[in-house]
Image (cartoon, helix red, strand yellow):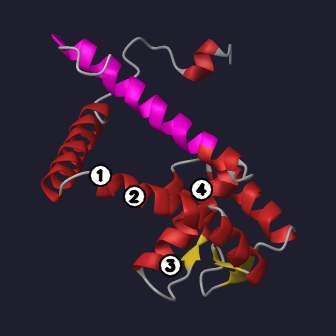
Amino acid sequence: MEGCPVNTDKEYLSRLNNLFKENDEIYRNAAKRVGLPDCAFWIFYILREDSIKKEGNILTQSEICSTMYLPKQTVNSAMKKLENDGYIRLFNTNDRRSKQVSLTPKGMALAENTVDRIIEKETDALAGMAADEKETFLRLYQKYNDLLNTKMQTLTDSAGLSAKALEGE
């Protein structure tokens, strides 16, 4: 499919969706190769990526949830398991609704042997692109996300069929 001419927006959408799915599969397989469940992988990834960006900054559970774009309950359950296994530490902040999250020494060692290696492979892959290609890729991807978000905001239940109606409630 690579290099095939695309004639319609539906064909572009199909190729784009296939790329998204392929990218998801790449990360799922990478997490599996290093022995991490998918959700735990992304928690470690966000904690490590954030520590690279802002040395010493500690994230909250809420910030991790919003960054992962997964249901809060899913992420919090995974964090509870990581805490029980001794990989992360959750501690109270001034806001009682959210706890801060930090890696324990055991979690740091695991992250260094797993997530850090994946971030290194990502960096190596990006190094295969010229600076202008990286900027163009990011700019166009952001433009697509912005346009898609704007269009999605206009969705309504125009047919009168909500999930509740389909479930028979």
Residue 35 position (above or below residue 79): above
Mark 1 nearby-residue class (10 Å; few <14, some 14–19, many ≥20): few
First of labels 1, 4 by sequence position = 4
Q: Amino acid at mark 4?
A: Trp
Instruction: Decide whether the magenta segment is chiefly helix, strand or loop.
Output: helix
Q: CA distance from mark 4 to mark 2?
A: 19 Å
Q: CA distance from mark 1 to mark 2?
A: 7 Å
Residue 82 position (above or below residue 2): below
Q: Nearer the viewer, residue 166 or 108?
A: 108
Q: Is residue 38 visible?
A: no
Q: CA distance from mark 1 to mark 4?
A: 24 Å
Mark 4 lies on residue: 42
**Residue 4: image x %, image y %?**
23, 15
Mark 3 nearby-residue class (10 Å; few <14, some 14–19, many ≥20): some
First of labels 3, 1 by sequence position = 3
Helix or strand or loop: what does disc 4 sit on?
helix
First of labels 3, 4 by sequence position = 4
Q: Are marks 3 and 2 in contact (CB under 8 Å)?
A: no
Q: Amino acid at mark 1?
A: Gly
Mark 2 nearby-residue class (10 Å; few <14, some 14–19, many ≥20): few
Q: Nearer the viewer, residue 123 or 95?
A: 123
Mark 3 lies on residue: 51
Q: Amino acid at mark 2?
A: Asp
The residues colored magenta run: 6-29
Q: CA distance from mark 3 to mark 1?
A: 25 Å
Q: Are marks 1 and 2 in contact (CB under 8 Å)?
A: yes
Question: Would you identify the image quadrant in which residue 146 lies?
Answer: top left
Q: Is residue 49 left or right of residue 95?
A: left
Q: Amino acid at mark 3?
A: Ser
Identify the residue at horizontal 47%, vertical 87% (top origin).
Answer: 55
Mark 2 lies on residue: 124
Helix or strand or loop: what does disc 3 sit on?
helix
